[in-house]
Amino acid sequence: MSDEYRIFGGEMSPYSVKIRSYFRYKNIPHQWLPRLQYEEEFQKLARLPIIPLVITPEDEAIQDSTPIIEKLESTFPDPTIHPEESTLVFLSALIEEYGDEWANKLLFHHRWYMEMDQVTTAHILAREALPNADRGTVDGLAEKIRGRMSGRGAFVGSTSDTAPLISRYFDQLLEILEPHLENREYLFGGRPDFADFGLGPQVYQMALDPTTAAIIRARSPNVLKWAYRMTDPRNDGPFEDWSSLQPTLQPLLRNAGTYFLPWTTANAAALENEEENFSVQLNGDEYVQSPQKYHARSLGVLRERYAAVADNSALEQVLEDTGCLAYLH
């Protein structure tokens, strides 16, 4: 039996790149299998039609990027992706969730909203699926992909009404990350942690798309270096403590408390009330979309994480100061 893991993923999938980045950091033997080129095998092995799909050496199939990392972390604990301080462990998990669920919204909107981004991404995906096909065949598949994906914007809250808001959220994220990454390699210090694997691949994907790439390259060189660093991260030093991280990391947590947590809480409430759409005030602006089931489940997991460490007074103070605490009960 081979000791290699198999990763069915895609170059334009932030969650696939997230898992590949983790495997590279841990130096875990693996094969990278582009899902679009191994579709028949993927369909036989996957329980859900999503990537990444990881097949272990024991032929166990694992899906969903966060559970994949959590499972593998118990098997490959060194180097750890969790700081020693319990406060930082939860804050890292919160930012990981923010990356997976909120930053992905920023990515999806910008990738599929404007024509230039739609055409670019659709052609990349088509060529990945048909690496040896002629131009006409690739163009035909690209047009189908573009039509399918650009029509899904409203499902994730990307509409003409919310477009200016989402662009503003993106700008604010860059403004927060740029000074934080000026004198450190990763979000929590000299090595990647859980948060980096959640947020980094989303930003890396945005650094590939025409509109967001131009903005990142023009305004945020530190963010750009970090995003590419996260494709093959290294252990370059220790984690920092909260006192050194606080000045520039606290604004990111405050951003989560202002936008992400109110949004995901309203989403969960809408699902519980069986509403077709929900509206939530985010820093004074109305944001409207239809509810999404997965986000509600992941919010429940985040709240379970907090409940397990809720007796941590230092953590509670940080969450209170950043507006996050009220949404974690």
Image (spheres, rainbow, N blue to C red):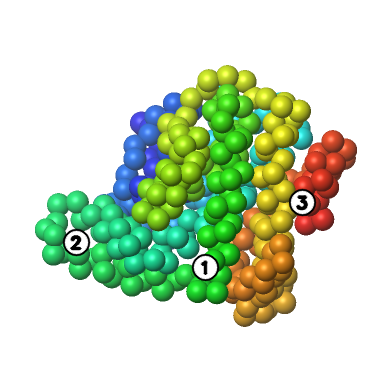
Where residue 144 appears, x then y in whole percent? 28, 70
Q: Quadrant of residue 96?
A: top right
Q: Answer yes or no: is residue 74 visible.
A: no
Q: Answer yes or no: is residue 232 visible.
A: yes
| Kind of residue at badge 3 | Cys
* Residue nearer the viewer, 274 or 44: 274
Where residue 117 appears, x then y in whole percent? 36, 60
Of badges 2 and 1, the one in the foreground is 1
Q: On the rendered image, what quadrant is the C terminus found in?
A: bottom right
Q: Residue at x 14, y 52 (%)?
A: 132
Q: Residue at x 28, y 54 (%)?
A: 124
Around disc 1, counting alpha carbons within 10 Å, would you say few (fewer than 14), some (14 to 19), or many (20 or more)? Answer: some
Tell how many labels: 3
Residue at the disc numbered 1: 163
Where residue 297 appears, x then y in whole percent? 65, 59
Residue at the disc numbered 2: 138
> In the shown orientation, is residue 319 left or right of residue 218?
right
Q: Earlier in the sequence, mark 1 or mark 3?
A: 1
Around disc 3, counting alpha carbons within 10 Å, would you say few (fewer than 14), some (14 to 19), or many (20 or more)? Answer: many
* Placement of 154 over or under 127, stated as above or below: below
| Kind of residue at badge 2 | Val
Q: Earlier in the sequence, mark 2 or mark 1?
A: 2
Where residue 284 appears, x then y in whole percent? 72, 67
| Kind of residue at badge 1 | Ala
What is the distance, in whole Å, between disc 2 and disc 3 at their CAs?
A: 46 Å
Residue at the disc numbered 3: 324
Q: Residue at x 33, y 52 (%)?
A: 35
Q: Earlier in the sequence, mark 2 or mark 3?
A: 2
> In the shown orientation, is residue 153 left or right of residue 266?
left
